[in-house]
Image (cartoon, rainbow, N blue to C red):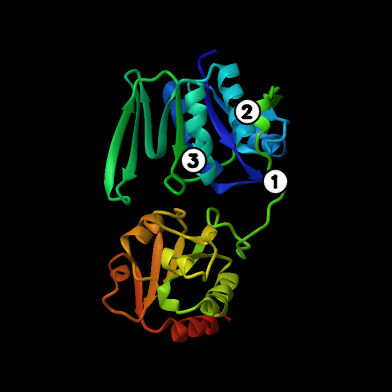
Amino acid sequence: MSQPILVWFDAQGDQPSRPALQAVQVARQVAAETGRPLVAVAAAQAADVAARYVPSVLRIDTELVNQDRHVRALQTAFESQGASMLIMAGTRSAQAILPRVALRVDGAFLEDVLQLEVSSGGTQAVRLSQLQRIRETLRTTAERVVVSVKIGAFEPAEPAAETGTVTPLLIEMEASDERVRVERELAESANSVSLDEAGVVIAGGRGLGSAEAFQQLLAPLAHRLGGAIGATRAAVDAGWRPYEEQIGQTGKTVAPDVYLALGVSGAVQHLSGMRRSRLVVAINQDADAPIFKHCDVGIVGDVHQVVPALLDALA
């Protein structure tokens, strides 16, 4: 069998994560272009879900309670399958895990890619750098390649016509994989919808004026629209919202169908994290705010007056 294309698959319950489906879409394209088989790697709870999208699934029954174990599992999958490529959505976890996997399998690492092409001459990827303003084309001739896919850059994959097969993969952990354990997890964000998954994102900036404004204006709007709350770095630095909600160069990158920017000035650092939103609506009382150059719908007005009126209209 030719060297397969591996893709890491995440799911919450019986629902696949949107970033995972985007990674599957890229992996499908590469597999089709190269004629190589496509194989998903998934934790036990996600394996059956992965089989709805990928023809062959490697099920990891060992608990991946820390990053070291996750790295070991992906390394084992790569080496046991004689894989040529591993693709994973560019989550924060991937940023920590994938470079280590690439090192262990003696492969090249292509990060946060927007386009990916494999040919007889090697693997070519396109990514953005310099606050998303510079488009880079990278090429590697390495036989093994590890890729993180920029979240929001690709459409999510649809279910396959047939359900795939699931095969257990034995992982032998080493002592070094047990150095760190996650004892407990506490949710810091009040979002009921993940920013990575949200079709609607309501982001607040310094123009809101206070943490209370987020609760009084953004929270009801997010609840009404079924969206997630985001924030600029200025709002996070002020202590108004948790870091997990920060959008921008030093925060998350989102690509919702609708992005509402409330009291957001439009600094380039923030724009880099929401640039791929399909429809951007901005509300700001400063008519000269840079955000109005990057929105589809702009409203010049006080968010404390406009948002309540919007909530009334949605009632």
Bin the neighbour count of mark 1 within 10 Å (Cα to Cα): few under 14, some 14-19, many 20 and up: few
- Could you give the CA–CA distance between mark 1 and mark 3, rounded to whole angstroms? 25 Å
Secondary element type, mark 1:
loop
Q: Residue at x 69, y 30 (%)?
A: 60
Q: Position of residue 1 (x, y in %)?
A: 55, 12
User: Label 1, on which residue?
Assistant: 14
Q: Earlier in the sequence, mark 1 or mark 2?
A: 1
The percent coordinates of residue 282 (x first, y second) are 38, 72
Q: Quadrant of residue 66?
A: top right
Q: Looking at the picture, which amino acid does disc 1 mark? A: Asp
Q: Residue at x 61, y 22 (%)?
A: 76
Mark 3 sits on what residue? 95
Which is nearer the eye, 237 or 3? 237
**SS at mark 3 in the image:** helix
Q: Which SS class for mark 2?
A: helix
The residue wearing badge 2 is 73
Q: Viewer-nearest of labels 1 and 3?
A: 3
| Disc 1 from disc 2: Cα separation | 22 Å
| Mark 3 nearby-residue class (10 Å; few <14, some 14–19, many ≥20) | some
